């Protein structure tokens, strides 16, 4: 295990550097396919219906073997075991990151501090299930004793992106009240969402681990005023619940104690959808489907812990990420879900990946590598084909692409379109690989040899979705271990937050001393316009 010298000084790293130079000097991706008729079999993995094809990445059996050596040199498996057993892997905040416990089906206890968190999780889940059932069945009613028809989740970042992605992906499973999400402090977000809602039949769930996030509190305040206007001050709190690790703050805001659902410090915000932060989902899709989501994630957890590295999907996905980032120096990667229902996946992965691994400081006595998390971006296929795929095929920078597609649409009546959608997905990765051939004009030429990974599974269900998201969580973790960063803190977002208060006064022409001329100039321009 490396400590001070850093992973870049290890034999495996240096071997990979030399191997990459040789490989690109002697082979194109097209040639690798031409030379190995079993390339797909050799470089794809499967877990039940989930296929991960990384044969369209410029690598060989030697690459894989060296990457596995790199994982060993970085101690990835030991760190993984530390993650699952509750060690303080989040060393800057001295706490574990136990999102995996939230979906564990183990009967054993897991002690954090002096508390058995498995018991705490079961108790929390029982309260959540009971509350969700009462909302769904109309036993817990709104003003005028009417059932709630709409639930609005107020939250941002990890308290929004995961639940929003899952709610959208599982739309076919919704059989509870309608679900809406408000995140932006731009008041038009709130205004647009509530425009069609009946305040007398709307429940707001304030989702905030810290219960101190400016955007969320501002939107909660707007909700309070909007409700008070319609139902009167006394009834407002019948329309509020909260999911938070700061129950006292939620209570001080006014939420009734019995409607406050706790999570814990050891649940990271971007890993929290499996906790009380998932309450809006539980209300929308019901207990069975919510727990199927957790089961899917648990299935991937078990696979991550048990499968040998060469057959381990999150491990290999992470290692390919490192191969691209550190040995090819690709600065970005694109996520391309060929699924309208997975349209929020790129935004979710942006937070998961970039908030986890967009760092320079080393963690846990390790030295961070020179290049850590790439920029993650993307959009749904086929729409993105008509937007930025031009650059993917002919641009001057190579962008590794990650295609995600499902074999079957939820509704067989939509299958004709779905076949075309899938053909589009296959066509794009094929075109990236092969490019154009023959003697054609330069402006028509696509060089090909552009790498992609494809994830395919049968259908979007709660189980397959949970499995997919856990795959990405663990990929992020694997990469963080090799890069030597702490995937579970986010100190970089604090600086901007801390300046907001000052800037409010600058916009009022106070406290401008010490501000740079650009910030002063912008504030002055805004004052004139306002
Ligand atoms: O801005 C970053 C962040 O702290 C995220 O990590 C988190 O998911 C989000 O803000 C929301 O935080 P909270 O759940 O405490 O409102």
Image (cartoon, helix red, strand yellow):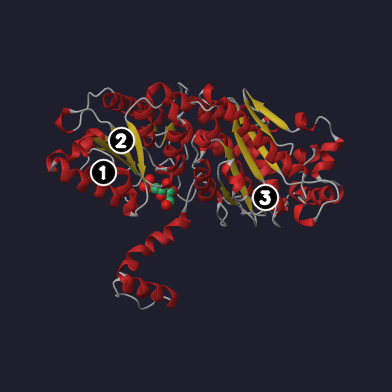
Q: Is residue 472 above or below residue 482?
A: above
> In the image, what residue occupies the spot 25% across and 36% down?
202
Q: What residue did someone put label 2 on?
A: 151
Q: Nearer the viewer, residue 416 or 158?
A: 416
* C-alpha distance separating marks 1 and 3: 46 Å
> Badge 2 local density, few (<14 within 10 Å), some, or many (20+)?
many
Q: Residue 190 shows which numbered tag?
A: none
Label 1 SS: helix
* C-alpha distance separating marks 3 and 2: 40 Å
Counting from the top left corner in percent of width and height, residue 362 is at: 57, 54
Q: Nearer the viewer, residue 155 or 112?
A: 155
> Badge 3 local density, few (<14 within 10 Å), some, or many (20+)?
many
Mark toward the viewer: 3 or 2: 3
Label 2 SS: strand
Quarter containing the C terminus: bottom left
Q: Is residue 90 above or below residue 510?
A: above
Counting from the top left corner in percent of width and height, residue 211 is at: 31, 47
Q: What residue did someone put label 3 on?
A: 392
Q: What residue did someone put label 1 on?
A: 250
Mark toward the viewer: 2 or 1: 2
């Amino acid at each position: 295990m490396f400590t001070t010298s850093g992973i870049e000084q290890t034999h495996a790293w240096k071997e990979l550097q030399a191997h990459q130079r040789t490989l690109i000097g002697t082979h194109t991706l097209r040639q690798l396919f031409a030379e190995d008729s079993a390339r797909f079999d050799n470089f794809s993995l499967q877990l039940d219906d989930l296929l991960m094809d990384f044969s369209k990445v410029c690598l060989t059996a030697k690459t894989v073997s060296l990457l596995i050596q790199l994982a060993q040199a970085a101690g990835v498996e030991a760190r993984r075991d530390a993650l699952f057993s509750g060690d303080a892997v989040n060393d800057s905040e001295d706490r574990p990151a136990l999102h995996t416990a939230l979906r564990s089906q183990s009967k054993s206890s897991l002690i954090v501090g002096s508390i058995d968190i498995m018991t705490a999780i079961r108790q929390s889940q029982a309260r959540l299930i009971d509350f969700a059932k009462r909302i769904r069945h109309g036993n817990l009613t709104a003003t005028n004793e009417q059932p709630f028809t709409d639930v609005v989740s107020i939250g941002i970042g990890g308290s929004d992106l995961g639940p929003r992605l899952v709610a959208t992906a599982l739309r076919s499973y919704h059989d509870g009240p309608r679900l809406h999400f408000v995140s932006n402090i731009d008041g038009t977000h709130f205004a647009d969402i509530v425009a069609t809602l009946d305040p007398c039949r709307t429940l707001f769930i304030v989702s905030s681990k810290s219960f101190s996030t400016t955007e969320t509190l501002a939107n909660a305040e707007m909700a309070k005023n909007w409700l008070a206007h319609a139902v009167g001050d006394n009834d407002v709190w019948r329309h509020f619940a909260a999911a938070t690790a700061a129950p006292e703050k939620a209570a001080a805001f006014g939420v009734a104690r019995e409607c406050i659902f706790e999570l814990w410090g050891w649940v990271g915000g971007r890993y929290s959808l499996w906790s009380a932060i998932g309450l809006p989902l539980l209300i929308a899709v019901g207990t069975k489907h919510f727990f199927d989501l957790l089961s899917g994630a648990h299935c991937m957890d078990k696979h991550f812990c048990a499968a040998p590295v060469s057959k381990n999907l999150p491990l290999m996905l992470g290692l390919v990420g490192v191969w691209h980032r550190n040995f090819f120096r690709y600065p970005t990667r694109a996520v391309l879900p060929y699924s309208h229902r997975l349209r929020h996946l790129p935004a979710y992965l942006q937070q998961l990946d970039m908030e986890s691994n967009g760092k320079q400081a080393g963690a846990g006595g390790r030295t961070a590598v020179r290049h850590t998390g790439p920029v993650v971006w993307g959009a749904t296929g086929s729409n993105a084909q008509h937007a930025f795929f031009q650059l993917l095929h002919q641009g001057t920078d190579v962008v590794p692409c990650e295609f995600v597609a499902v074999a079957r649409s939820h509704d067989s009546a939509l299958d004709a379109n779905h076949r075309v959608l899938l053909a589009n997905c296959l066509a794009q990765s094929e075109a990236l690989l092969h490019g154009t051939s023959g003697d054609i004009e330069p402006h028509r030429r696509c060089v090909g040899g552009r790498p992609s990974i494809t994830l395919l599974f049968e259908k979007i269900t709660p189980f397959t979705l949970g499995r997919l998201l856990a795959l990405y969580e663990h990929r992020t973790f694997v990469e963080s271990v090799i890069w030597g960063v702490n995937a579970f803190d986010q100190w970089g977002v604090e600086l901007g937050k801390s300046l907001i208060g000052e800037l409010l006064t600058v916009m009022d022409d106070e406290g401008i001393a010490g501000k740079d001329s650009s910030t002063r100039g912008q504030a002055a321009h805004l004052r004139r316009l306002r």
